[in-house]
Image: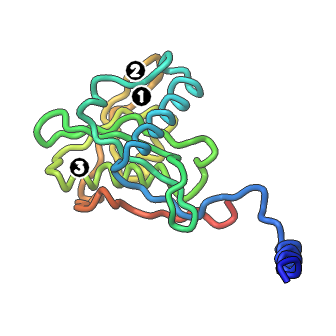
Amino acid sequence: MFGEAIAGVAESFEMTPALPAFYTPIEYRIKWTTLPWEAEEAYKLRRAVFCIEQGIFMGDDRDEIDDRAQQLVAVSCIAGIPEQVVGTVRIHEEAPGVWHGSRLAVHAAFRRHGKIGATLIRLAVTSAHALGCKTFLAHVQSQNVPLFRALHWDALEQEMMHGRSHHLMQAQLDHYPPCAAPRSGFVTQARSGS
């Protein structure tokens, strides 16, 4: 009897189609970091993008702002369960009512999935807005200026930072209503066909 049960299980596995070798998550949660693993993975992603891929920093990109900044993450989800950090940005209040966003990074394999960067920007500004932000600024690499303009940001000036052309940009806060629940954040879906 036990042997027949095993044979029946084996047959059902043989009839089950194989899972695809490449799986793309269909959902991403964009939120404030709430767990230590999220923060550590965000720092690893920043090192991969800013130190290895872009070569802007040697070894590590962390600085004194990290001690007072709020880290945000984009986490890919499989069946609603968090899997990995695929994007990050940090925000901090520089002066009363003046907030800054920096270190926006999206994993290279996920840059065309579900508007991850745009949703990180949206949560960064809306959560700062809920905390009394009157002005939200960011130094944006020149190649990313079109994205920020499409998201209702104004370029204030151009300057060189870390050997690269950047634009100081300001968010139009009227396009970013306050988000009072940044720890749960937003969910974005992957584009079909991605």
> Is 105 situated above or below 56?
below
* Horizontal and vertical percent position of residue 74: 46, 51
Q: CA gap, disc 2 to disc 3?
A: 24 Å
* Horizontal and vertical percent position of residue 34: 33, 50
Q: Is residue 29 left or right of residue 113?
A: left
Residue 58 in view, yes or no = yes
Query: Residue flagged by tag 1: what amino acid is it?
Result: His
Q: Which mark lies nearer to you, 2 or 3?
A: 3
Query: Residue flagged by tag 3: what amino acid is it?
Result: Ala
Q: Which mark is residue 166?
A: 1
Where does label 3 land, which residue? 128
Where does label 2 land, which residue? 161
The reply to whether the C-beta atoms of the residues labelled 1 and 3 are less than 8 Å apart is: no
Q: Is residue 160 left or right of residue 126?
A: right
The reply to whether the C-beta atoms of the residues labelled 1 and 2 are less than 8 Å apart is: yes
Residue that appears at 83% across and 79% down? 2
Query: Residue flagged by tag 2: what amino acid is it?
Result: Met
Q: Which mark lies nearer to you, 1 or 3?
A: 3
Q: CA gap, disc 1 to disc 3?
A: 22 Å
* Horizontal and vertical percent position of residue 7: 89, 77
The reply to whether the C-beta atoms of the residues labelled 2 and 3 are less than 8 Å apart is: no
Quadrant location of the N terminus in the rendered image: bottom right
Task: Give the mark nearest the N terminus, 1 or 3.
Answer: 3
Residue that appears at 20% across and 44% down? 135
Secondary structure type for disc 2? strand
**Most extreme residue toward the left, as rendered?**
96
State the scheme by which the image is colored: rainbow
